[in-house]
Image (cartoon, helix red, strand yellow):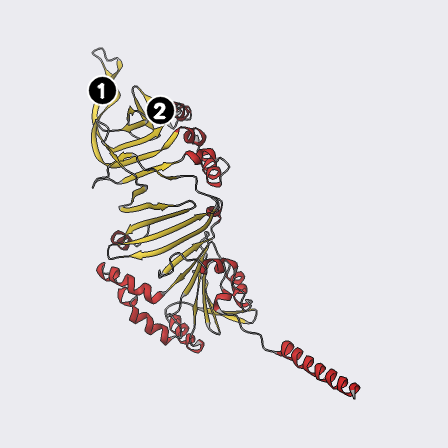
């Protein structure tokens, strides 16, 4: 009896094992999700297209952009539904420093996307081909490619399409790339409609563990908010008490920095210190002497024009028609420059080093930085002021850390908003009217 029971149990166990193995060996594998297919790049991003359209529509309407009616929430939502693109979910973007870019979007109905491709063919020369049994569409003239599968749409523009396509089609369920995992787990900018995460090697070389950027805009400008997190501590912080120049309406360019850098000086092995040293060597700038002398305050301001008397030598003929050189003066218009830097007892050694390298030249009692106009020097305690006007600008209290820079008529404004032990929060603000007129960001 016991033997019969044992035999029955063995048969039942064997049958159960066979059924279990059958389920494992013959079950249909779970298809990958869209996020499992996402390729990594120097910059990766998420965008909620419909919410972004709501946010930017006022700016486009205010500036009367010709294509504004094609970027409204209602239009984009309708187009998405017509061609099976689910724009109510995030679109994922990626791009590299070399200019190769791509995007992936959810498809709510893959059967509808061909209608969009056929419509596109009326305006663009589109061909099709196959890679690893997967069909794709392309335009060789601008190296643009389009591929779609069950539940996803993939767009790419660049030189490495097949390499990236291989990553997309060979993805596995729950196989999200570690870069996307890290990005999507971030708590910064959770409620923003466009968020960019950087894997850029140049930022990594500075010891920056995390770099993120988010979009914000109103009718007159758009702002790129930034968040940087360093692997090791930041060895500098904002200065509590400092002096600077006051900005005015005519200011075209201004750099205003006020940092406590004493710990930074002590940590020469820090990645940022090492990289700044390398950059200094590349341009012949004596970074070691600079950081030894600098006490954290630096301000440069340029704006407006001024008349100054400039000496020149003219060759003339005397009464006997002999040539002689005569020193004369003429009035010329030059940009107004002012620069202020705080330095300790090593300040003069730093200036001497600049003069030996030809970056700073002395002309009589005055100075000239590379191609700058003639500058006077005024020293007040640890403050050195170089200025082109008749007198040095007035110094005012300041703890700002920002840059205003005008390029081709467009004024950019960048500021460091706050610093913590290993984090930097900042923002870049760009006026949109000039950009829309020129159709260029810079």
* Residue 419 tag number: none
Does the CB distance between marks 2 and 1 fall below 8 Å? no
Determine whether, in the image, residue 388 is placed left or right of residue 263.
Answer: left
* Res 216 visible: yes
Q: Which of marks 1 and 2 precedes in the sequence? A: 1
Q: Nearer the viewer, residue 19 or 112?
A: 19
The residue where tag 1 is placed is 328
Determine whether, in the image, residue 414 is placed left or right of residue 281.
Answer: left
Percent across and percent down for residue 138 are 46, 66
Quadrant where the N terminus is found in the figure: bottom right
* Res 101 visible: no
* Residue 361 tag number: 2
Toward which corner of the image does residue 405 lie, by quadrant? top left
Residue that sits furthest to the top in the current view = 320
Kindly identify the residue that appears in the image at 43 percent across and 49 percent down: 229
Kindly identify the residue that appears in the image at 26 percent across and 57 percent down: 218
Toward which corner of the image does residue 254 lie, by quadrant? top left
Measured along the vertical axis of the image, is residue 430 above or below residue 113?
A: above
């Amino acid at each position: 009896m016991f033997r019969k029971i044992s035999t029955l149990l063995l048969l039942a166990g064997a049958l159960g094992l066979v059924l279990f193995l059958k389920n494992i060996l013959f079950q249909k594998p779970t298809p990958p999700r869209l996020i499992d297919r996402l390729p990594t790049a120097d910059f990766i991003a998420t965008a909620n297209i419909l919410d972004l359209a709501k946010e930017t529509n006022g700016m486009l309407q205010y500036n009367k952009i010709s294509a504004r009616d094609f970027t409204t929430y209602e239009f984009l939502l309708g187009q998405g539904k017509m061609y099976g693109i689910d724009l109510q979910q995030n679109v994922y973007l990626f791009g590299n420093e070399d200019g190769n870019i791509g995007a992936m979007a959810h498809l709510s109905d893959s059967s509808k996307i061909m209608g969009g491709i056929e419509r596109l063919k009326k305006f663009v020369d589109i061909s099709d081909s196959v890679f690893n049994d997967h069909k794709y569409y392309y335009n060789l003239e601008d190296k643009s490619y389009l591929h779609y599968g069950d539940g996803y749409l993939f767009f790419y523009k660049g030189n490495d399409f097949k390499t990236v396509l291989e990553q997309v089609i060979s993805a596995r369920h729950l196989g999200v790339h570690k870069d996307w995992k890290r990005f999507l787990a971030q708590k910064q900018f959770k409620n923003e409609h466009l968020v960019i995460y950087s894997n850029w090697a140049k930022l990594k070389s500075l010891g920056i563990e995390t770099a993120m950027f988010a979009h914000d805009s109103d009718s007159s400008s758009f702002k790129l908010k930034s968040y940087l997190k360093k692997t090791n501590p930041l060895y500098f912080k904002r200065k509590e008490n400092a002096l600077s120049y006051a900005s005015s309406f005519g200011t075209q360019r201004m750099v205003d920095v006020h940092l406590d850098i004493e710990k930074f000086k002590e940590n020469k092995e820090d990645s940022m210190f090492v990289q700044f040293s390398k950059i200094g060597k590349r341009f012949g700038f004596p970074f070691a002497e600079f950081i030894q002398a600098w006490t954290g305050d630096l301000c440069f301001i340029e704006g407006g024009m001024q008349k100054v008397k400039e000496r020149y030598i003219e060759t003339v003929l005397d009464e006997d028609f002999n040539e002689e050189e005569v020193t004369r003066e003429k009035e010329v218009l030059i940009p107004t420059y002012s620069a202020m830097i705080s330095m300790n007892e090593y300040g003069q050694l730093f200036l001497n080093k600049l003069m030996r390298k030809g970056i700073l030249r002395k002309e009589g009692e005055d100075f000239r930085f590379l191609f700058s106009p003639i500058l006077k020097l005024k020293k007040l305690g640890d403050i050195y002021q170089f200025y082109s006007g008749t007198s040095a600008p007035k110094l005012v209290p300041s703890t700002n850390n920002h840059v205003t820079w005008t390029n081709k008529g467009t004024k950019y404004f960048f500021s460091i908003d706050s610093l913590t032990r290993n984090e930097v929060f900042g923002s870049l603000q760009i006026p949109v009217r000039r950009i829309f007129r020129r159709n260029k960001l810079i």
